[in-house]
Image (cartoon, rainbow, N blue to C red):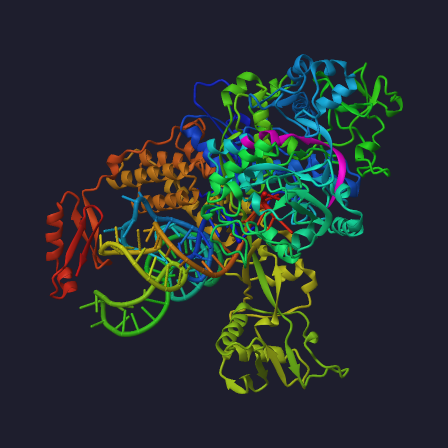
Amino acid sequence: MSYHFNAIEAKWQKYWAEHQTFKAENNSDKPKYYVLDMFPYPSGAGLHVGHPLGYIASDIYARYKRHKGFNVLHPQGYDSFGLPAEQYAIQTGQHPAITTETNIKTYRRQLDQIGFSFDWSREVRTSNPEYYKWTQWIFVQLFESWYNVDIDKAESIERLIFRFSSEGNTNVNAVCDEDVSSFTAEQWNAYSSEEKQNILLKYRLTYLADTEVNWCPALGTVLANDEIVNGVSERGGHPVIRKKMTQWSMRISAYAERLLQGLETIDWTDSLKESQRNWIGKSVGASVTFNVNGHDEVIEVFTTRPDTIFGVSFMTLAPEHELVSKLTTDAQRSEVEAYIEATAKRSERDRMADVKTISGVFTGAFAEHPFTKEPIPIWIGDYVLAGYGTGAVMSVPCGDQRDYDFAKHFKIPIPNIFDNVDISEAAFDDKSKTIIANSDFLDGMNYKKATKRAIYELEQLGQGEGKTNYRLRDAVFSRQRYWGEPFPAYYVNDKPQMIATEHLPLMLPEVEKYLPTEEGEPPLGRADVWAWDRLKAEVVSNDLIDNVNVFPLELNTMPGWAGSSWYFFRYMEEAANRDAVFATEEALKYWENVDLYIGGSEHATGHLLYSRFWVKFMYDRGFVGVDEPFKKLINQGMILGTSAIANRISNFGTMGGRDERGIDNVGENIGNTFISKSYVDEIRKVSQEYKSGNPLFRITLKRNGVFIGGNQIENEKLEVLSEFLFAKTTPNTGQIWIGTDSFEKIRANVNFVNSADELDIVKFVEYQKEFNESTFLHEDDGSFVVDREVEKMSKRWFNVVNPDDICEQYGADSLRLYEMFLGPLEQAKPWNTAGITGVHGFLKKLWKLFVADDGLKVDDSEATKDNLKTLHKTIKKVEEDIENFSFNTSVSTFMIAVNELTAQKCSSKSILEPLLILISPYAPHIAEELWHQLGHDTSISTAAFPVFEAKHLVESSKNYPISFNGKMRFTLELPLDMSKEEIEKTVMAHEKTIEQMQGRTPKKVIVVPGKIVNIVG
RNA sequence: GCUGAAGUGGUGGAAUUGGUAGACACGUUGGACUUAAAAUCCAAUGGCCAUUAUGGCCGUGCGGGUUCAAGUCCCGCCUUCAGUACCA
């Protein structure tokens, strides 16, 4: 009986599905463990071998934890709202729900055939109304909440209303919009309901505001900062411009400090935490207000260096700063306006690309220094960003390089306020070495003292206070798209009202086209039935809008991260109980949060920050019992492709060649000509040898030989090449010049290349038809060899490998093992299908250890000492490896174990059965099959993990490496209980030692019992 | 620029607290089996030198250092990848 992996795998996948083997229990005596993957967006392209890497790792861990006696929740689902389905809908008219459904089917089939132990009964899809009902519900809760700074948590908006009506807002310490004015209880109670709503909107955790947004005209939507890469949209690479729009925003800034502090409590990688810290961008300093000469307005700035306040020699405002037009003097007005216009025209991308150019304009106005009362010129410059801090800076050229450069450029004085520091060349920004001078009451103080004193003095003047600033901005939450969650909001007199939660979900309406309307409204503006009847509590036709009982509904939809910010809680609840709640209290209490989360690092500042924010909010409001979603998080590295490069000849010179039309032959008439690798390597080698710095180096091929710089060289390879090329040129071509740059990399489909890098030319030209008129210079043995290059797995490089093909050819167990064997989980590594024969061969050997031609060969024979030693060292190593997520090394360990047991001719059930359990998380199908062949009738996944017994590894002797001056010369088997002295005596007396020493006396002999002997001298 | 990660054979990668560098695989070469191929099995495989077996020298990005002993620790560089960037 041989190893028929296809049949075995299909059989057990069916068995697991039918027996619901991996269904998690919400009531269990076992300890719980929650293993989660970042759920996929079901794209039309399906999975390539890079995608399942993290799923395989988490699956191994989940299966391992089950063996270890845990009740494991290991679910999977789909992040099924999103742009690609909508783009496809725009192009084809196909409803995104249909595309999504089709894609999900493909994903499910692909996932199923890899043998994951997912509990599919808990699947979620963010685009399902039963799911997004609760996304909308959470949105309503955010709307109905405000952030109370005094208790540092979110509270119901009802409590805020109560406080307003009883004490006004002066003592309310909230995170809110900056433009709220103070009012008393009497004033509040006298406000109209509309005025009250206006004020409350400034406090709600989700609110409508006119914000500068990243508008992407090509996609017709707003993008979040993390959806923009290098100034263009992450999806599609379209340009992005700044635009002011009324948008829903999330007051994530309220949680900045807690999001920062929370990082200390979770087990994530340093790089990920660092990304989030940078994104939150906390800086501690002071806010300072400057009076403006001749104006009532003041300019507020934020500075991290209040200690340098006496070094201020000018101020700079962002060109967009609201005071600019008021302050600008008539004399300067035309210049300032021209500058503002020029800046507005420059795209964000230009501004980023060009950080070297210093530009700015003087406004003509002066501010007053808070202490010296000296006038300070006010400039505008685009190096100051409107979106950060107050959009204005106090410029201290001696202490900040940008201010310094600006001052130099515009010949503004650079006063030096540092003791004993030369600032003639550059600014001085080393806080630790700062001693302040020329600064009145700050003279002689260090950074820390001076900062404290400066803030104190500013407070005395009423012109400043200590302040902490965060880079983290409130998150824009509206998207002008169709395929997303509708906001459960309608508008009464343009003021947003929430639909009562009992009427949710508010279902996505049908539209005939998925494009924005002619008036520029989002696609939902095309829906005819998209108005809210407040009396009937249902969606009705737009014709019925009377703004009395029937009102227009919100036309934007929620962004991609809405549904993914809480899905991990949804899995906790069984499908049957999901209607009335997003998850029951018992389920939430039992599963708490995700113990292990595996996914890509690209979500560092998007998904992973937003979900932490939502979880903290839900925690504050008592909806969940935890304030962090993911206790431990691992980023899997990307699997890269190994492209196959066929070298095509181009860019070479000829002489004397004319074709039949009399046109100079410069190479184009040789057509598609491919040269096998060894010839290319030969050219590279020869060029390397003779080039000596000449970048234009060429080898000259003549009909009578190969020449370099006029000298003939003997080179068989190049002579063959020469003959081949001359055969393709016109008869009177005299010379051909060729060099390392004479080749063009043509990528061939990697699936047509074998493990020896030989290209199947027939398939290649059949598949890449543009090359079907090509000629090939083969190796001596008739093969054609390609170069290999590692790059991202992508269709355009023809290096995509589909897991379906791998499963068919080698099986899912081979795929799983090979993905792990490739290298450390967190590391990026190239996929090369050639190597899979190694793990596949291992599975065959494993099979043979159990099964002979005539059937099962496992018996009840007693295990030998060696058998036990092999087993137990394997148990130890594999257990350590899994706990450390070092899956690659455990695959090697299995190989060693099977090699050893095969050599030992082990057939003992007492050894082979535990071995099977060890392997089953990695290669579950073969393990399950052999397990049942051994006579079990329940799944191997329920078997207990073997227990390591140290006694089997106890050795009585050790093969000591004997080193001389640190270099190992020979080994010597010695008993482990031998004393240091005896070891030294024995080693010194050994003939090889005497030979090594050649009569010298050792200066020192180091003996580390159980480790090493080192003889010095 | 800043932050983080990483540089080890032809390739992917191993190497507990510093203690036999290159495990395990791929590939390559030679051999067995076969009409042949595939599959399987056996042997060799870091480089250089030597060869009659024994051997010798060099080797973990580069340059220093600590140590009996360094891929591992310290100092200074270089390179690659990822993230971020006029953040006051």
Q: Considering the image in quadrants, where does the N terminus of chain A appear?
A: top left
Magenta-colored span: A241-257
Judge whether residue A16 is colored magenta. no
Closer-to-camera residue (A652/A557): A557
Q: Residue at x 58, y 29 (%)?
A: A255
Closer-to-camera residue (A560/A507): A560
Residue A132 visible in the picture: yes
Q: Residue at x 67, y 84 (%)?
A: A731
Could you tell whether A527 is left or right of A745 in the image?
right
The count of marks equals: 0
Would you identify the image quadrant in which residue A374 lies? top right
Could you tell whether A516 is left or right of A758 in the image?
right
Q: Residue at x 73, y 16 (%)?
A: A188
A253 shown above or below A736: above
Residue A227 visible in the picture: no
Task: Point out residue A629 in the picture as x, y percentages from the top left corner.
Answer: 53, 29
Task: Point out residue A46 in the picture as x, y percentages from the top left corner.
Answer: 63, 42
Closer-to-camera residue (A480/A563): A480
Q: Considering the image in quadrants, where does the C terminus of chain A appear?
A: bottom left
Task: Point out residue A45 in the picture as x, y percentages from the top left corner.
Answer: 66, 44
Task: Point out residue A26 in the picture as x, y percentages from the top left corner.
Answer: 51, 20
Judge whether residue A253 is colored magenta. yes
A919 shown above or below A358: above
